[in-house]
Amino acid sequence: MSESTPICRACQHPCTPCLGVNERMVWKEDKTNEEWNMSMKGNHSLGIVIKLGTSSIVDEKTHEPILSILTLIVETAVRLRKDGHRVIIVSSGAIGVGLQRMELAKRPKHLSKLQALAAIGQCRLMSLWDSLFGHLRQPIAQILLTRNDIADRTRYLNAQNTFNELLDMGVIPIVNENDTLAVSEIKFGDNDTLSAITAAMVHADLLFLMTDVDCLYDKNPRTHPDAQPIEVVEDIGALVADVSTAGSSLGTGGMSTKIVAARLATSAGVTTVITRSSNPGNILRIVRHVQASKSPASLVTQANAETAPATRQDQDSARDGTLSRSTSSVRLNDALTAEKPEPAPLHTRFLPSPHPIRDRSFWLLHGLKSHGTVYIDAGAHKALMRGAGLLPVGVVDVEGTFAQQEAVRLCVVQRVSPSEGGSSRTWEGPAVEVGQALANYSSAEIARIKGHRSAEIESILGYADSEYVTQREHVVFFKESRPATPVRDILDSQGIGGYESGAATAVL
């Protein structure tokens, strides 16, 4: 091999890139040994977010902390840190620990009592984390968030900077929703959603959603012995899985909320893993397997290690109807698979979007809760797609009550002329939601200027803050449009807003 032979960063072999997994090539002669080793070390450092539900760390009946699992989580997190990874833990359990401290038998229903229990339990929970991590000389930090902290752009950036600084210092942040202050209007709904937003905020590589089952199944494994595991999900929109597993009596989540979180995280480029919480050591094995495989789409698990098809064609022929044990599996070429990685524990891995939405675009879509809907015609939609702003003449209708600079949904409808049908309705047919935007005018103001030219705004309102209802830089479109239905409003009231709501059903 000549000194100028190109070396693949992913496998360190003199070959072509690994099927596009890592297309960047370097010339070894351009790097000293020290520089090469440093670059490879950087490639192995991952950002990892681990989400733990209340049922994973607090006994459902006695409300006692499950020290065996907590200890293993701490050991796993410290090992990941020693391997050079950046680790964040999203931990529920404050109310559960508060119940134990106050010797209450069950979770109360009144908000004020829940907030009080969260205040009691949060300090004891953090004390427990600090004590366990302290034995291994690992510093930790507490970060409490509400949706208001995410909705305000300045506070969002401050939280992002704090996370990055803590991780640079080698600290493990422990995140929870600030239940003491949160009410339904500013809650994330559950810590699954919070963990996905946190993972996107810090540009994490992996998000682990710990639960009481090994992975997703096509049917409920408790009632169907023939249920098949779903090991890799490439297209979450085409997923057919059983989500009947509900949250515990102490928690607020369930399997459906984990799919919501997976949809959020993967849209931001974060690989999401669902695995069993009672064996936290699986996290370390899965991380090492991901690194050894060199590809987020390559997976060898304990379930398919002996029966995995040898080729993509073989895999396709092995499918049974619309369901399969894996919705995507890519083998690396023979030069890269001489040494197969050790089979990973059974889990479900959601592959990240090839075109992730990050930073301000992610914040606009997922950090802000929609306060209303602006209906636009097809012409206005085309103009927005070309990079123009939304003029009032393209607005057909407005729904909801919102103020200036609040987030609104954008829906495309078919405009109806007043002469058609003789009704006051200005549009007909289905409303197709295409994105989200920050409004320059309030709902009452938009209702008055809709359908008019920008030059008429001042004569109608008495002032003209902008010629646009929303400017193009304040608009973000979904990768795929979807029908706007009343179900969204129900989900929004439960704290699942915007783009995530499509994942809250059993069939996606």
Image (cartoon, rainbow, N blue to C red):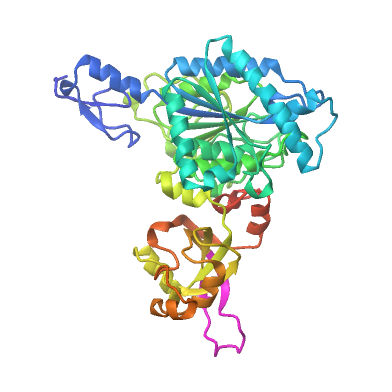
Q: What number of labels is visible?
A: 0
Front position in the image: 329 or 144: 144
In the image, what residue occupies the spot 65% across and 40% down? 190
Residue 35 left/right relative to 67: left
Vertical relation: 259 (above or below) 411: above
User: In the orientation shown, which residue stands out farthest toward the front?
Assistant: 462
Left or right of 98 on screen, residue 233 = left
- Please identify the quarter of the rendering in which residue 241 is found: top right
Residue 48 % position (x, y): 49, 28
Q: Is residue 202 left or right of residue 273?
A: left
Visible residue check, residue 309? no
Q: Residue at the location (68% across, 50% down)?
A: 494
Q: In the figure, 191 relative to 130: above or below?
A: below
Please determine whether, in this image, residue 346 is positioned above or below residue 201.
Answer: above
Q: What x and y, as percent, mark residue 116?
A: 75, 34
Left or right position of 277 against 291 = right
Q: Quadrant of residue 187?
A: top right
Q: Report the span colored magenta.
A: 413-432
Foreground residue among 78 and 26: 78
Q: Nearest the camera: 231 or 212?
A: 212
User: Nearest the camera: 233 or 186?
Assistant: 186
In x, y percent, where is residue 104? 84, 28
- Residue 198 in sight from this viewpoint: yes
Percent of width and height locating residue 415: 51, 78
In the picture, the quarter occupied by the N terminus is top left
**Can residue 268 be found in the magenta stretch?**
no
